[in-house]
Image: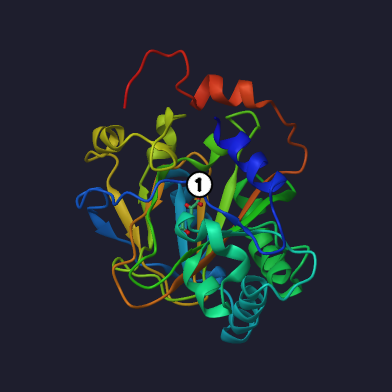
Amino acid sequence: MSADSEIELQFANATAAGVADLAGTEMHAPDLYDHDQVVTPLADLASIDEAQIEAFHRRGFMAVKSVFSPARIAAAIDGWEQLVAGGVPGYTGCQFEAFVADRIETLTVAERRLALRKLVLFVDHEPRLHDLAFDPDTLAVVSRLIGGKKPYMFQDMALSKPPLKGREKPWHQDSAYFNIPPDTPVIGIWIALDEATTENGCMHLLSGGHHLGPVLHFQRRDWQICDKDTHRMHDSEHPVAAVPLPVGGCLFFSGMLPHGTPHNHTDMHRRALQFHYYPETTKGTTTEERLAVFGTEGKDVTC
Ligand SMILES: O=C(O)CCC(=O)C(=O)O
């Protein structure tokens, strides 16, 4: 089953209580997120000059420390918690870990918080999260990163890594998930709602790896780049950069950049929002066309 059809199946079965995430729960190898550098973020959006835009295109990412105020993040967290608690009528985008699949309907709010894996499609249900997705200052940065074009927000999702149990998001390219031409300039924005550290599952990126082009993805612990391909691509020209961020910090990154986040080994929760943008004139393709580039079917390859 393709990643897309899994998602379609999950949402066909969605209830207000939520659905179970179908990705694997196996622990990653201890060295899969070994990093060569820890990124120091820019101070704020005003620090982004032409040299930073050029560095973004070279490295495939740009981290900024103070983007959203404590008050806006506190409001976003409140919005998040209401969605997770099941308190927003009509919202069906909570995805829980498979270990609660048979009892989602009966979980307490505290249990829902700890079993949540992902929130999807929330901006039309929660104005405080909508506010961050359509922030004019970050949209202006996205526009600069896509050559001055008008950005269109086409994906809103968020991963939760609860204390000690929060699972890895294996190495992948986001563009491998989207039915759009692979050369579309896609920009992801990842916003830290909790402090993100190397221990609790901050973002890890293969610096410059977006220049390697599309990489084959396999359905293993998730729809992901094979671990051995990640090791193969990781060299002196493509170092692994870890990006710790404070609350309200923000990472801008290319949809073609290989990235992943390790297991949360701490007693801190790690919540983050992720939005994706492309130029508003972008035209879609089909799943077949996407898998012809990113998929493994019929390519006689193993992972
Ligand atoms: O928030 C995370 O841990 C990773 C999110 C991510 O990379 C993704 O879902 O594409």
Task: Look at the picture and state if 66 lies above or below 212.
Answer: below
Name above or below for residue 167 compared with residue 152. below
Q: Position of residue 27 (x, y in %)?
A: 29, 52
Q: Residue at x 67, y 58 (%)?
A: 93
Residue 198: x percent and y percent? 30, 65
Q: Secondary structure at mark 1?
A: loop
**Which quadrant does the N terminus fall into?**
top right
Q: Residues within 10 Å of mark 1 (few under 14, many from 20)?
A: some
Q: Position of residue 242 (x, y in %)?
A: 32, 59
Identify the residue at image location x=26%, y=33%. 228
Tell me the quarter of the picture where residue 231 sits.
top left
Q: Position of residue 142 (x, y in %)?
A: 63, 54
Looking at the rendered structure, the kind of residue marked 1 is Leu
Residue at 54%, 57% (x, y): give it.
102
Give whichever of 173, 48 is nearer the camera.
173
Q: Is residue 214 visible?
A: yes
Q: Is residue 141 toward the left or the right of residue 270 in the image?
A: right
Residue 192 relative to residue 95: left or right: left
Q: Quadrant of residue 300?
A: top left
Q: In this orientation, which residue lies closer to the viewer: 98 or 89?
A: 98
The furthest residue to the bottom: 71
Can residue 66 be seen?
no
Q: What residue did someone put label 1 on?
A: 22
Q: Is residue 147 above or below residue 142?
A: above
For the image, the number of numbered tags is 1
Question: Along the horizontal axis of the image, is 142 left or right of 164?
Answer: right
Q: Is residue 264 above or below residue 297?
A: below
Q: What color scheme is it?
A: rainbow
